[in-house]
Amino acid sequence: MRSPLSISNRIRHALRIDRAILFVWQASPGWTMLSFCLTIVQGILPLLTLYILKLIIDAVTSAIQSGETSTSGSQIIYLIVLTAGLAISQAALRSAAAYVSEAQGTIITDHVSKTIQEKSISLDLSYYENPRYQDTLHRAQQEGPYRPTQIVNGLISLIQNAVSLVAMVGLLFLFHWSVGLLLFVSILPGLAIQIVYARKRFSLQEKWTPDERRAEYFNAVLTHDVFAKEVRLFDLGDYFSTSFAAIRASLRGEKLGLRKGNALAEFVGQSFAIIILMGCLAFIALRALSGAITLGDMVMFFGAFQRGTEYLKGLLSSVASLYEDNMFVAHFFEFLDIENQIKEPANPQKLPSRAEKGITFENVTFRYPGEPDDVLINVSLSINPGEIVALVGANGAGKSTLIKLLCRLYDPQQGIVKIEGIPLPELSIKAIRERISAVFQDYARYFLTVKENIWLGDTGIAADLERIKEAAGKAGAAQFIEKLPNGYDTILGHWFDSGKELSLGEWQKIVLARAFIKESRLLILDEPTSSLDAYTEYYLNNKLKELLADRSALLISHRFSTISMADRIYVLDNGRIAEHGSHDELIAKNGVYADMYRKHLSCNRFE
């Protein structure tokens, strides 16, 4: 993963809001346009309301002074009705704007989640093993769903406040230029405070992310079913609960400390604004007492200054919020800007429909990013069409790594992997993975129906029940599936109502069926019988060649009953191919394989 941006570079990067606006527009153009139109109208109406209020007060004052109250009554009632109409219109517009904002926010939140999911599944596997990536993903997930919406809402609020403010300032300049100027001056300290603390929050969020993720992990240990048995058996609840509480207490202290400083600074800024406001109101009142303006003018200018202060405060607050939101939305776009190291070829070659040359590893050397030692060293092997090849070696010898390279989840630093004589980097990633089906040792359990769990092995086909049943039969799963409450429609796991939990062996049969349903050229089986009962394992070992038909298979297992039926066995030792051959040939060589086999027998592990 590329080096993260420095905080100052992130801030400069974030200050471009065009990308966030474009993102929101693409997610909901209709709602965004409607929101903009409502904003303009809402910005103009307050000026009309103030002006009509002035007319009412002047009409009332004039009527009292002239004694013609009866003739002026109809005009005053008309103005009051007009004011009521404007007030109702404003209320309707506020309700409509709230609904539009809610609709727009929901759409954008869903769009952000979809974008994060699509980006996440497109990234190299190596990112999932990188803590800095996990920090970036965490921040994107936290900030992404609401920051773009907040930016657009902030812009809308800014426009609305700006339209209203321009109207009020224009009105105040008619009274005296100094009042309009003081209106701006009164809010400047508050704006500076918000910008300063926005920077502080942004920089501290960078610091807090690893601790927040660690706290989330401790919470998961305490609440998820994966850890439930060990947490209870080893009485780990207090340890993880205390660890979680300590991290949260530290974060809470720092966040509250920041908020305390911000609150004190805001109090100083607001006090400054209040003093200027009272001074301007006194100036307007004195002009009214001297007869320079009417009572209606005084009320209008009073209202204009007070509302202008609110609009200016809202405007500057929107600017400060935009500044902060744009800094934080950089986390979201930083995640979207991550580039894969594994690149798709510009002009991918096509694989032949028939397997003729198989798969080859030629002098492959690989080490994981950031690790000092090579996991595979100068590895060469081949898997011919229709051949069953087994990989044997101690834990950490590099067997699973070899599978990752074959699936092009990583690229080797040296050497090349080929399918049908074509180097993997010259093939589309989709074409490579269409050729491969796999049962991984750390297989996934999907809390869906049995039918869906098996069909997920090849979603490119229709969810045909007969084909699903055929795959289940090959995996030895059909018998227990038929005994489930709803057969193939039974939901697995205990996460949802009516779910049925399976044993490890039953889950492994489901996963085998998932692999068998895909008509791939190569089937990878990583410890495929580790949780199976003896009868099912015996069945699979004896029927595997028949089940594979003309497909190739790559087996990884510690069970010699499974390994011995392979056509060829490669022994990995400290990242190198130590020897290879059939089971009988390797026993005759009396090398690493033969030694492993004898130790296996001596431990009574041979089945």
Image: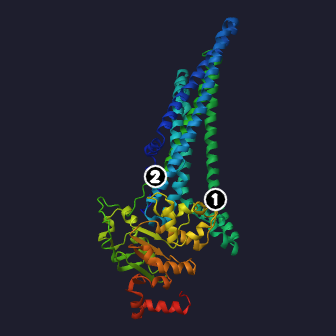
Q: How crowded is mark 2: few (under 14 residues within 10 Å), some or many (20 or more)?
A: some
Residue 203: assigned label: none
- What element does badge 1 sit on? loop
- What element does badge 2 sit on? helix
Which residue lies under the disc numbered 2? 333
Q: Residue 324: in sight, yes or no?
A: no
Residue 16 higher or lower than 547, as above or below: above
Q: Quadrant of the C terminus?
A: bottom right
Q: Residue 20: in sight, yes or no?
A: yes
Q: Quadrant of residue 142?
A: bottom right
Q: Which is nearer the N-term, disc 1 or disc 2?
A: 2
Image location (x, y in percent) of residue 43: 54, 29
User: How many numbered circles does the render carry?
Assistant: 2
Q: Residues within 10 Å of mark 1 (few under 14, many from 20)?
A: few
Q: Quadrant of the N terminus?
A: bottom left
Callout 1 amino acid: Phe
Callout 2 amino acid: Phe
Horizontally, is 351 left or right of 476 in the view?
left
Residue 472 higher or lower than 533, as above or below: above
Which residue lies under the disc numbered 1? 496
Q: Residue at x 43, y 62 (%)?
A: 3
Q: Residue at x 63, y 25 (%)?
A: 88
Residue 588 higher or lower than 377, as above or below: below
CB contact under 8 Å: marks 1 and 2: no
Report the front residue among 307 and 553: 553
Image location (x, y in percent) of residue 588: 40, 94
Q: In which quarter of the image is residue 592?
A: bottom left
Disc 1 from disc 2: Cα separation: 35 Å
Residue 48 higher or lower than 403, as above or below: above
Image location (x, y in percent) of residue 479: 58, 70
Report the front residue among 83 and 274: 83
Image location (x, y in percent) of residue 525: 46, 74
